[in-house]
Image (tube, rainbow, N blue to C red):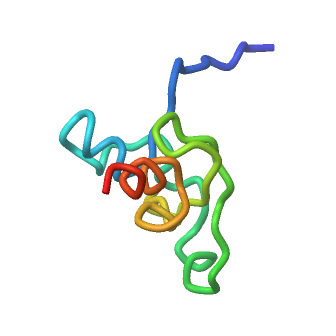
Amino acid sequence: MRKRRRKMAEFCYQCTQDHFGDGNKNDFQNVSKKSNTDKGLYASVLCEGCGYTQVNHDGMCIHHTTDCLVAENEKSEM
C-alpha cells in the first residue's frame, strides 16, 4: 500500500493569492464539484490562513469576508 504524501499547510484560493500570488494553484481546488456549489453545498476544510471554513469547487473560501480567521483579524484591526 502506497503512503499518501502529506503537505505541511493547505490554503484556500484567497490565502494562496495573498501568500503566493496565484490563487488558481490552491490546495482545495476540485475538492467538490461545481454541481455541488450550484446547489449551495460546500466542502468543509482546514485552511492554514482561514482556519476551519468552507470552500466551493474552485477552492474559494465562502466566508473570507465575514466569518473566517482572516475576516476576524481584519475586523479587529479597524
Pinpoint residue 4: horizontal percent, then vertical percent.
68, 19
Residue 47 picture location, percent across and down? 54, 41
Q: Position of residue 26 (x, y in %)?
A: 39, 43
Q: Residue at x 73, y 14 (%)?
A: 2
Identify the residue at image location x=61%, y=61%: 32
Viewer-nearest residue: 63 or 40: 63
- Which residue is outermost to the left? 21
- Choose top left, top right, bottom left or bottom right for residue 58: bottom left
Residue 42 picture quarter = bottom right
Whether residue 31 sits left or right of residue 70 in the image: it is right
Could you say which is closer to the camera, residue 10 or residue 77? Answer: 77
- Using the image, determine if residue 1 lies above or below residue 73: above
Identify which residue is drawn at 64% across, 86% down.
39
At which x and y percent is residue 35? 59, 79
Farthest-out residue, bottom: 39
- Whether residue 24 sits left or right of residue 10 in the image: it is left
Where's the N terminus, which quadrant? top right
Q: How many marks?
A: 0
Quarter of the image containing the C terminus?
A: bottom left
Q: Is residue 71 depicted above or below 42 in this figure?
A: above
| Residue 51, above or below 74 | above
Furthest-right residue in view?
A: 1
Q: Residue at x 56, y 85 (%)?
A: 38
